Amino acid sequence: MNPLQKIGAFTAALAAAFGTAYGVGTAFGPLDQETTAAGHSESHSPEPAKKPPAGDLLPAGLQVSQDGYSLDLETTAVPAGKRSTLRFVVRDADGDPVTRYRTAHGKQLHLILASRELTTYRHLHPVRAADGTWSTPVDLPAAGGYRVFADFVPAAETEGLTLGSDLTVTGPYRASEPPAPAATTTVDGYTVALKGTLTAGGESDLAFTVRRDGRPVTDLEPYLGAYGHLVALRSGDLAYLHVHPHEEAVGDATSGPEVSFAATAPSTGTYRLFLDFKVDGTVRTAAFTVRTGTQAAPEADPGTHEEETPHGH
């Protein structure tokens, strides 16, 4: 570990232990190394990756470079509680910016931001400039470490990629933890109930029922090609799960109260589920904590509605 890394590690330890300002180490300049789940380090502006051998599969979002594409996060730190601009570039195997994409779920690129504690979540759709630079306004409420996920399909490919990189949100830091598992949660007066069990190492069916004032909501509006959009992240390393709606097209679906998905969990552990649904022109996010192999008791989660998960789309 080089001296700058030691300084950053010491700063993070102080922030976690005493609630001091997160990101004070940036006074010495951003760290240029990022540790991946496999224990290797990669530079912030990574060398273009070569395609891995067939069968060498990892959960999505753990790598900054994969299959010849790299996520170059130009903005590495933003202040907590202030509107800022996040900029990044997707580069190909030659290091050139990618400027052509396929449309998937209604957008050329989906950007997911999540705090390391998985209590803050944003699903954003940035704008791409002619030179390939993507940008989006962000306003993140709490200081700490965040993960940025870019979900996209290059025009030259048929399969999508999810690349991840780290973002620092500076300011006074207070450690937090996600709520305990529960089968229901409430956001903006809507109660969402989860049915299904996440299974490690296999595909699971997850169904969400939306109600308001005890009545089923049957006027869900189309959002990203379906009546709901689900993102699932593994606690700890924030692996990005592969999730697919059971209905690929809105025309094949009903407009509520239930939306369902197939999710594949790569391992045992705790996961956070973020369900986006749209009613009256507004997208809301219902968040759940689940553990593999466990069906949560059907009781309300009093803490979830306090999270910074809704809106920001």
Image (spheres, helix red, strand yellow):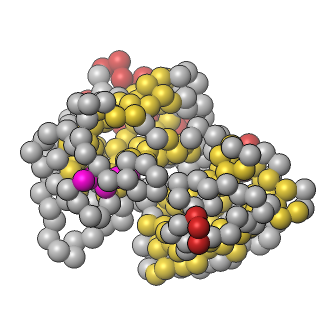
Q: Position of residue 248 (x, y in %)?
A: 51, 69
Q: Tell me if 127 is positioned left or right of 96 in this view.
A: right
Q: Which residues are magenta?
A: 151-155
**Residue found at the far left of this picture:** 94
Task: Check the image and report above or below for 156 versus 22.
Answer: below
Horizontal side, residue 250 vs residue 39: left or right: right
Q: Is residue 73 above or below residue 226?
A: above
- Give the quarter of the figure containing the N terminus: top left
The residue drawn where x is 44% and y is 80% is: 201
Percent of width and height locating residue 47: 13, 44
**Relative side of 65 to 278, left or right:** left
Instruction: Residue 178 in the image: state x and y as whole percent.
Output: 63, 52
Residue that appears at 50% across and 30% down: 138
Check the picture and name the quadrant holding the C terminus.
Answer: top right
Q: Is residue 74 left or right of residue 213?
A: left
Residue lying farthest top? Answer: 27
Q: Tell me which corner region of the image, top left, top right, bottom left or bottom right, holds residue 148.
A: top left
Q: Quadrant of residue 180?
A: bottom right
The one of 292 and 70 positioned closer to us in this rendering: 70
- Looking at the magenta stretch, what is its main secondary structure? loop
Q: How many marks?
A: 0
Please tell me which residue is depicted at 83% across the width and 64% down the height of the picture: 216
Q: Residue at x 23, y 30 (%)?
A: 131
**Residue 22 vs residue 72, the one in the foreground:** 72
Q: In this orientation, does residue 256 appear?
A: yes
| Residue 230 vertical placement versus 135 (above, below) | below
Name the spot of residue 209 as percent of width and height, x first. 74, 67
Q: Quick one: 191 or 182, which is closer to the camera? A: 191
